[in-house]
Amino acid sequence: MKKILAIVLIYILTTLNVSAQWIQQTVPQNITIVNSINFTTGNIGIATGWEFDSQIPTSGRALYTTNAGANWNSGNVPNLCRVIVSTEYISPTILLGVGAINLVSDATNLDTQFSDFEVTGKFKRSHIKETKNKVLNIYRGAFFKSTDGGINWFEYGTLPSGCNYLTYMDFINANTGLVTADVGSPNTTQDNIYKTTDGGLTWSILLSQNINGQLESIQYLNENLAFATGYDQIECTTHAVFLKTTNGGTNWTRQVNDSIGYKKAFFINNNTGFIAGGNSATARILKTTDQGNTWNNVYSKDSVIMGGVNFFGETGVGIAFGNRSIEGEPYIPHAFRTTNFGATWSVQIITTSSDPFLTSSFMLDKYNYFVSTAGFNPDCIFHTTNGGSVGVSYNTGSFPDKFSLEQNYPNPFNPSTSIKFNIPSRSQIILKVYAINGKEIATLINEVKSEGSYEVKFDAGNQPSGVYYYKLFSGNYSETKKMLLVK
């Protein structure tokens, strides 16, 4: 009887369809880029961004969900809203957002292409220099508010004059918040930081001298401590810049590094934080444990355009996100996950499509998180409830002569285990995990791999104790082994 059950189980495993751990969520067709994604509970969330149309200015969009993204519905934004690029919940019904308003309703004379815009909807400097007489004063910065959970949005408050764009925000309570602002002339990029203490009704300028570059993120830790990251042009050379205030924004210290630029940063407490940065040649994740005074490189990866990093509180679990090129192939969305405060990172493929570019992430818990993308693919929000696919390490000194799948170690395990396998030649590799009833639990790998020996870590932290099977596919080859999770 046991032999018959085993044969039936193996048959089930060989006939199941392939699917990814990152699930594409369907969003309304009229959105090109999702810049911000945010949740107030496991079910209620907001996503905002913009739609590109070459015949009109970029047009802002807002989406909301009440079922964790199973369905996304279109919200209503002001008529000339250009973009809502960053959002934050003050309560389940009150939301704040930053972005820009179009000052003209028709811009057909601009002859714009999608490549003329930054991911936030701003014109790229190269395009502005070519058409600056046409693009002067076609948009301005704007602060937005919703009082019904993101269904309806309206412009709120008065910003300082000369504000072209608001690009990022963080509030510590309903009244006090910081935003990064583009204040440069149309053919330059200069940023500053604004502060409000009345919920966005009025704002004050904080930096005595503009950043001659761009601030990518800002984080308010408490009423005194805040950080901002980005890049600065110093003597015609781009440098990463890290700003810190310890007195609520009255004074800021500036730290400049040689890296091309810092993307979005995340501090898990007042002292420990992470920054994703670098350039397309080499991406880096940096960590500080002394409030940003010193930084250590905890992860490097070639051919990655990094977008940012996010952690779930002080659990040690975090993800960085970006687009990666493998062996010269087109850049595709990846996530990089750590479960030990950045000591090690696993590599995850979110989708094999080269169209979307990752823009933001949000973590509901250690296993449940979202990423949003830019691109013409309408399915531009991805969601995982099991931590995403699991990363792979590669032994460059090993050249196997045949396919083989080794027994996982440790076995039994709790909650993670390592799986090793060998590839004799460049091949499409699929590695999956199934429950004893044949239900697919995880896709650990689904990509082309070069010859060599590989090791994959499988984290079953959100799975019940029991017997599981893992199976390696490649062409006509397949092999299945059993493992035991004991909690």
Image (cartoon, grey):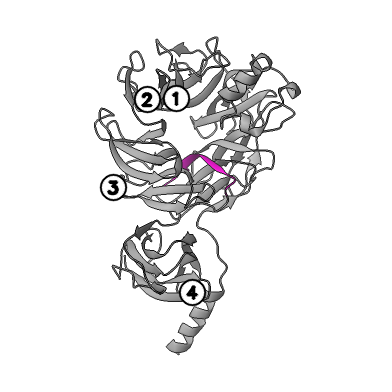
Q: Measured from the top left, where is residue 35 in percent x and y?
A: 55, 35
Residue type marked 2 = Val
C-alpha distance separating marks 4 and 3: 35 Å
> Mark 4 = which residue?
437
**What is the x, y in percent for residue 371?**
51, 44
Residue 241 has which mark? Answer: 2
In this view, the mark in front (4 or 3) = 3
Q: Mark 4 vs mark 3: which is more N-terminal?
A: 3
Q: Quadrant of the N terminus?
A: bottom left
Name the element at disc 2.
strand
Q: Which region is colored magenta?
A: 354-365
Q: Is residue 470 above or below residue 384?
A: below
Give the residue pinned by disc 3.
Answer: 343
- Sooner in the amino-acid sequence: mark 1 or mark 4: 1
Residue 2 relative to residue 19: left or right: left
**Image quarter of the C terminus:** bottom left
| Residue 258: x %, y % from top left | 34, 29
Task: Give me the C-alpha separation between circle 2 and circle 3.
Answer: 24 Å
The residue wearing badge 1 is 215
Hey, what amino acid is under mark 1?
A: Leu
Q: Is residue 164 magenta?
A: no
For label 4, the crowd category at 10 Å Cα-Cα, with few meaning under 14, some 14 to 19 and many 20 or more, is few
**Sooner in the amino-acid sequence: mark 2 or mark 1:** 1
2 and 3 marks in contact (CB < 8 Å): no
Nearest to N terminus: mark 2 or mark 3: 2
Tell me the CA gap for discs 3 and 1.
27 Å
Tag 4 near tag 2, CB within 8 Å: no
Q: Is residue 299 above or below residue 397?
A: above
Q: Which residue occupies 38% across, 69% down? A: 422
